[in-house]
Image (tube, rainbow, N blue to C red):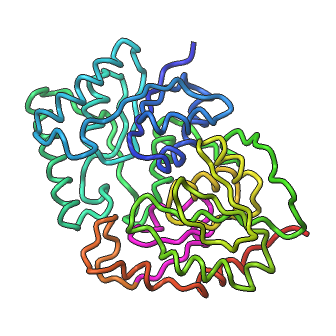
């Protein structure tokens, strides 16, 4: 019987995708369990051999509960729910004391992760990020007072560089467990039907929506780009449209709605390239082995660019506050306003396709 490993990933969909190579590699030696948000569970079910999934909607998503003891209690309770599974190891790739408390309460024999030091915490010098980090340090200290001699983490890892990609944090955890991350593409099972009436030109899938305004390139720029002769003549355009979204591609371009994850995978699977924001579709396309041109605004591509596509990121570091991590301190999004259609065209022209 394989030993049991708990992987804690309580962030969003794109972050779940970034953990997949570790989950795949760990499955060679462990019975892998994943604790994630309900929305992210479908990402893990895309794996050819899915892990055992435990869903949990974190109570601190909207800033509640805010007290140290309330957060401690929520993480403690969830950890105790998982305790009967007797994990041999538990791991998390984010510097988050709440996750540390949860892993400690499972009583996993090994608990590997990143303590909330300044070097481990992304954008640690932003005022609101500094406040969160200090809250986390206080939580770590409270745990130590309540449980002397029983550390949150039995093995503390530290990022090797302030610009280290988040993917490498999973590689560090894999190294601590004497494992390798499996980055061979595709990472997920891609079984969607091909797009109909496909012509000889490469298919460029366009996803022009973003969850946050700080990641949304202006729709007028999208339309300018999609209507340019250099795009319409070189590519067969396919636009993924969210419910209620306005199209940005010309009228004769194919429009596809993707009401669920499998339908989005189907469209991305048939793409020759993908153009989108710093978003979940970018990471999903990279997991399928697709070249991805990504527009970055408030985020830091050194940390969160899609796997194997850092060189295709389009960004203008026009804002003195960058990276603000989605909390803009200016009166407008300078980072996004600075990106031009010509910037995107240059990246698209660099794509190479087999004849």
Residue 73 colored in magenta in the image = no
Residue at image coords 59%, 42%: 260
In the displayed structure, 74 sits above or below 200; it is above
Vertical comparison of 117 with 163: above or below: above
Q: Position of residue 187 (x, y in %)?
A: 66, 44
Q: Where 107 falls versus 209 (above or below)?
A: above
- The one nearer the camera, 228 or 291, is 228
The picture places residue 210, in percent across and down from the top left corner, at 47, 61
Point out residue 152 in the picture as x, y percentages from the top left corner.
25, 33
Q: Percent x, y for residue 118?
A: 24, 59
**Which of these two is toward me, 183 or 241?**
241
Q: Tell me if 171 is positioned left or right of 199 in this view.
A: left
Name which residue lies at 48% across and 74% down: 217
Image quarter of residue 76: top left
**Quadrant of image for the N terminus:** top right
**In the picture, which quadrant includes the C terminus?**
bottom right
Exactly how many numbered labels are in the figure?
A: 0
Q: Residue at x 37, y 65 (%)?
A: 162
Q: Residue at x 11, y 38 (%)?
A: 68
Q: Quadrant of residue 321?
A: bottom left
Specify start and end residues of the magenta stretch as a single range.
293-317
């Amino acid at each position: 019987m394989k030993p049991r490993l708990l992987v804690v990933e309580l962030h969003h969909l794109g972050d779940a995708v970034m953990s997949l190579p570790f989950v795949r590699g760990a499955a060679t030696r462990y019975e892998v369990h994943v604790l994630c948000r309900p929305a992210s569970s479908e990402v893990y079910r895309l794996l050819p051999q899915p892990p055992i999934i435990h869903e949990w909607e974190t109570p601190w998503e909207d800033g509640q509960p805010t007290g140290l003891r309330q957060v401690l209690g929520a993480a403690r309770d969830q950890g105790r729910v998982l305790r009967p599974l007797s994990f041999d190891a538990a791991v998390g790739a984010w510097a988050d004391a709440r996750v540390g408390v949860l892993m400690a309460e499972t009583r996993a024999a090994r608990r590997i992760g990143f303590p909330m030091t300044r070097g481990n915490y992304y954008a640690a010098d932003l005022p609101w990020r500094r406040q969160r980090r200090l809250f986390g340090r206080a939580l770590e200290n409270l745990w130590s007072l309540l449980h002397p001699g029983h550390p949150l983490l039995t093995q503390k890892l530290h990022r090797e560089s302030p610009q280290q990609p988040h993917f490498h944090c999973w590689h560090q955890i894999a190294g601590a467990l004497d494992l390798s991350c499996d980055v061979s593409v595709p990472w997920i099972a891609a079984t969607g039907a091909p797009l109909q009436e496909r012509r000889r030109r490469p298919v460029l899938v366009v996803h022009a929506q973003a969850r946050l305004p700080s990641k949304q390139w202006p729709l007028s720029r999208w339309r300018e780009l999609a209507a340019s002769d250099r795009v319409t003549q070189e590519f067969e355009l396919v636009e993924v449209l969210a419910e209620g979204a306005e199209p940005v591609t010309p009228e004769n371009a194919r429009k596809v709605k993707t009401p669920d994850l499998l339908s989005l995978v189907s469209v991305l699977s048939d793409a020759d390239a993908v153009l989108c924001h710093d978003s979940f579709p970018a990471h999903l396309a990279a997991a399928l082995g697709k070249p991805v041109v990504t527009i970055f605004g408030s985020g830091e591509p050194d940390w969160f660019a899609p796997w194997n596509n850092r060189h295709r990121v389009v960004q203008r570091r026009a804002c003195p506050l960058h990276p603000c991590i989605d909390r803009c301190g200016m009166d407008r999004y300078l980072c996004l306003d600075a990106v031009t259609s010509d910037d995107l065209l240059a990246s698209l022209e660099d794509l190479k396709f087999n004849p």
